[in-house]
Amino acid sequence: MLMSTTSPLERSACAKVILCGEHAVVYGRPAIAFPLSHLRARARIEPSGQSFRILAADLNRLYTAEHDADRSLIRLAAATLDFVRATHREQAGLPLAALRAQLTLRSEIPAAAHLGSSAAVSVAVARAVAAYVGHELTPAEASALAFEAEKMHHGTPSGIDNTVVAYEQPVWFVRAADESNAGAPHIDPIPINTLPHLVIADTGLSTPTRIPVGDVRRGWESTPAVYERLFDRIAEVVNAARQALLAGDWERLGRLMDDNHALLSELGVSCPELDTLCEAARRAGALGAKLSGGGRGGNMIALARDAQHAALLREQLLVAGAKRVM
Ligand code: MEV
């Protein structure tokens, strides 16, 4: 029988950055993403005298299993508990509310900045709840649970965010063929020895992913042939970027990042602030620059030649208006 622990425990999950292929990945094309292990969401869970609750400490919000059953985090916690019971062949179990525990959530990942904040929070919550009742989730299990929560937030996510966050390694990702995602996505860890020197700069504009994703969806519905052609061209860039990554050919990777940014602009998901930062990075000698993630704000990435050049790019991006640079 599953037993809940009697001492506090903490589980966490990292942020992510998309190297290339965002948006087209929602339509079955490949994309490449990297984990950002130094930026994390943390879920600490401990016994309490009351029924199950989640304190989102950064937002100062409290959600209880009794009163907020429709909240995505409470639904995720309940789904995690059900999953663990099914895995351990426990048919009948106590409802989530009967779990006398408080989960406290804190995140270092800026929200709505396209760094995978919602996926990281979901993976951390699922891991903590499962661990509390004695089960350590595998990356595939954590990713699948977080994917359900991502659907509540974003409508039609590809699944790349929850995947890279749960596996915490560079991934090549192709979503499952059908829209219901009944099939498994194709996930391929990318075995690279040297990571490219990426500088990540924040426009300071918060844009929920569902907004640009929804706009692309409407464009695709009205002129599918135009959008399918753009997605195909993005797929060519991503395939070439994988080769460049594996070969450590940073000059080529940089040019491909520029091409990807141009195609994303054609899709309508860039904005003046992202274009300004990309141009500033290129003027400062970046090998390439592009928006990363949903777009219309959030973060862009620039490829530096080495660590020293990355420091210079950082300075120039701050001068050009970046609110923060990693
Ligand atoms: C978000 O990080 C990446 C998008 O391609 C959306 C998705 O894949 O779900 C914009």
Image (tube, rainbow, N blue to C red):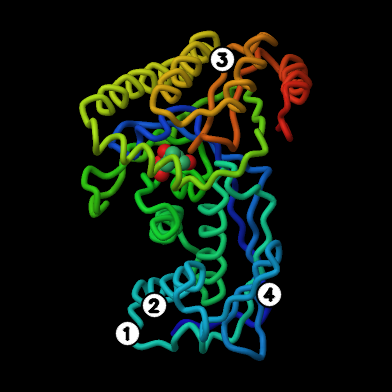
Q: Counting other residues with Cα less than 10 Å from the Cα at mark 4, is it few (<14), some (14-19), or many (20 or more)? A: some
Label 2 sits on a secondary structure element that is helix
Q: Is residue 56 left or right of residue 70?
A: right
118, 82: nearer the viewer: 118
Q: Which mark is residue 91?
A: 1
Which one is earlier in the sequence, the residue at label 1 or at label 4?
A: 4
Q: Counting other residues with Cα less than 10 Å from the Cα at mark 1, is it few (<14), some (14-19), or many (20 or more)? A: few
Which one is earlier in the sequence, the residue at label 3 or at label 2?
A: 2
| Residue 44 in sight in this render | no
What residue is drawn where x is 36% and y is 72%? 87
Calculate the distance from the C-alpha at mark 4 to the C-alpha at mark 2. 21 Å
What residue is drawn where x is 27% and y is 51%? 181
What residue is drawn where x is 62% and y is 27%? 273
Q: Nearer the viewer, mark 3 or mark 4?
A: 3
Q: Which mark is residue 8?
A: 4
Q: Counting other residues with Cα less than 10 Å from the Cα at mark 2, is it few (<14), some (14-19), or many (20 or more)? A: many
Calculate the distance from the C-alpha at mark 3 to the C-alpha at mark 4. 45 Å
What residue is drawn where x is 21% and y is 26%? 225
Q: Counting other residues with Cα less than 10 Å from the Cα at mark 3, is it few (<14), some (14-19), or many (20 or more)? A: many
79, 203: nearer the viewer: 203
Q: Which mark is residue 85?
A: 2
Residue type highlighted by circle 2: Arg
| Disc 4 to disc 2: CB gap under 8 Å | no
Calculate the distance from the C-alpha at mark 3 to the C-alpha at mark 1. 54 Å
Question: Image quadrant of residue 186?
Answer: top left
Calculate the distance from the C-alpha at mark 1 to the C-alpha at mark 2. 7 Å
Quick check: is the Cβ at mark 4 less than 8 Å away from ligand 1?
Answer: no
Residue type highlighted by circle 4: Pro
Query: Which quadrant holds the N terminus?
Result: bottom left
Calculate the distance from the C-alpha at mark 1 to the C-alpha at mark 4. 26 Å
